[in-house]
Amino acid sequence: MRMNLARSACLLAFTLGFGACQGEGADGASGGSTSSGGATGTGGASATGGSGTTGGSSATGGSSSGGSPASGGEAGGGAAPQTGGSSSSGGAETGGTTGTGGATPSGVDVFGITQLYPSAAGDAEWTAEHWDGDPYSMAFGTDDNDPSGLSGMRGDGTLEVTGDGELVMEGSQPRIYVYPDETRPWQNLEVTVYYQRVTDAGTAYAGLVVGVRSGPDGHNTDTACDAHTYYARLRHDGDIDFEKELKHPASSTGNSVDAEDVWPPNGILPTGQWIGWKFVIYNLDASSVQLESYRDLTEGADGGDWQLMNDLVDDGGWSVETDCAEHSPVGGESDMVVTDGGAVLIRNTDVTEARYRWVTVREIEAP
């Protein structure tokens, strides 16, 4: 992994208060450093500030023990060690800046929210417009109320559509999937979600977790090798990070920004507040992928004030535990870069009430 050098100037905005990125365990863990270099809080970006992932997390926790989708399983899992080198030779380096990272706004979506990247040709988009109407409980599988037929409930929990444009998640592993089709590969994407934390068990790695390029049935023990997912997480412990999964349930954390820098001064993810979140992903070439996450704290006023929070390139060196032959593992790990498209999922863990609205999934033109 390496940082997108075209965005290096944005890292100077660390002087505005985002501070250094500190690594920690992936799903199911809160300890263990995965990144010891990255940007400093007082001097801008530190391109030579140590290895990106020399130690790696060795956490063994997990968000779930798996289970088949029919029985409500398919959760994320424990962390695998990350073995990339320094940021200049394959390690992770941090993002976390204000501004839009060079993206030029390209209009607004159906909810009036600013689009940071231009749409791809054709009608390659999914929206949650159908949540505004009659209330209903979403059954497991495909949502019969979705006119596109692409979305549906998975996991263990309930999804309640309120009828006024909101979705309420509850349960141990609730999630909603948006599946690809022939015209919507969900490869180069801008995913937008507004999230309100209400009541939950405070599971550290849970919160607003958006996954992309996932195998539709990969998050269970029957087809575990099909997991291949990138996540952008706005976590209940206040941290933000990226996560990579190849074989369920092992995963590995990329860049992490400490809670105190995300939510100064006390590092607490607020409750009762609508928080906008964008996960942007696109291929740079045949073997490298750009990941970006953005946040809006204006509740969508004037399209939102979108701040670049994290920025990372996976071009190898970001390893995840796997023994699947298609991942070409070495020593039980693979740093395979996921360049194909796949399902989009929004998940949470151990929540009594979590609210979502203004969700869009949009295929974009890669810069």
Image (tube, grey):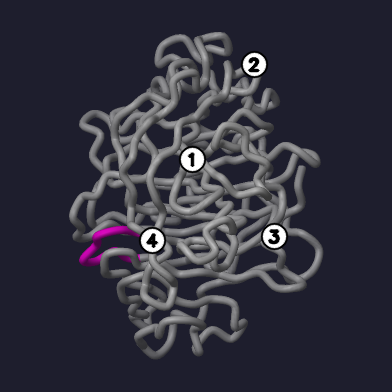
Q: Are marks 2 and 4 in contact (CB under 8 Å)?
A: no
Cα gap from disc 2 to disc 4, whole angstroms:
36 Å
Closer mark to the observer between disc 4 and disc 1:
4
Q: Residues within 10 Å of mark 2 (few under 14, many from 20)?
A: some
277 and 353: which is toward the camera:
353
Q: Nearer the viewer, mark 2 or mark 4?
A: 4
- Provide the residue designation for mark 4: 66
Q: Which residue is disc 2 drawn over? A: 88
Pointer 3 or 4: first along the chain: 4
Tell me which residue sits at (21%, 50%) in the image: 202
**Residue 170 occupies quadrant:** bottom left
Pick whichever of labels 1 and 3 is earlier in the sequence.
1
Residue 308 vertical position relative to residue 364 in the rendered view, above or below: above
In what quadrant of the picture does the C terminus appear?
Answer: top right
Can residue 168 be seen?
Answer: yes
Label 3 sits on what residue type? Glu
Q: Which sits in the foreground, 90 or 135?
A: 90
Segment colored magenta: 348-355
Q: Identify whether 78 is placed above or below 182.
A: above
Q: Residue at x 44, y 14 (%)?
A: 40
Front disc: 3 or 4? 4
Q: Estimate the x, y position of residue 297 in percent, counting from the top left.
A: 38, 47
Magenta part, dominant SS: strand
Measured as percent of width and height from the top left, residue 270 is found at 25, 47
Q: Amino acid at mark 4?
A: Gly
According to the picture, the residue beneath numbered tag 3 turns out to be 363
State the separation of the CA atoms marked 1 and 3: 20 Å
Q: Is disc 2 placed on a helix, strand or loop?
A: helix
> Which residue occupies 70% across, 53% down?
188
Question: Which residue, given by chain and number where applicable, does mark 1 sit on?
Answer: 242
96 falls in the magenta region: no
First of labels 2, 3 by sequence position: 2
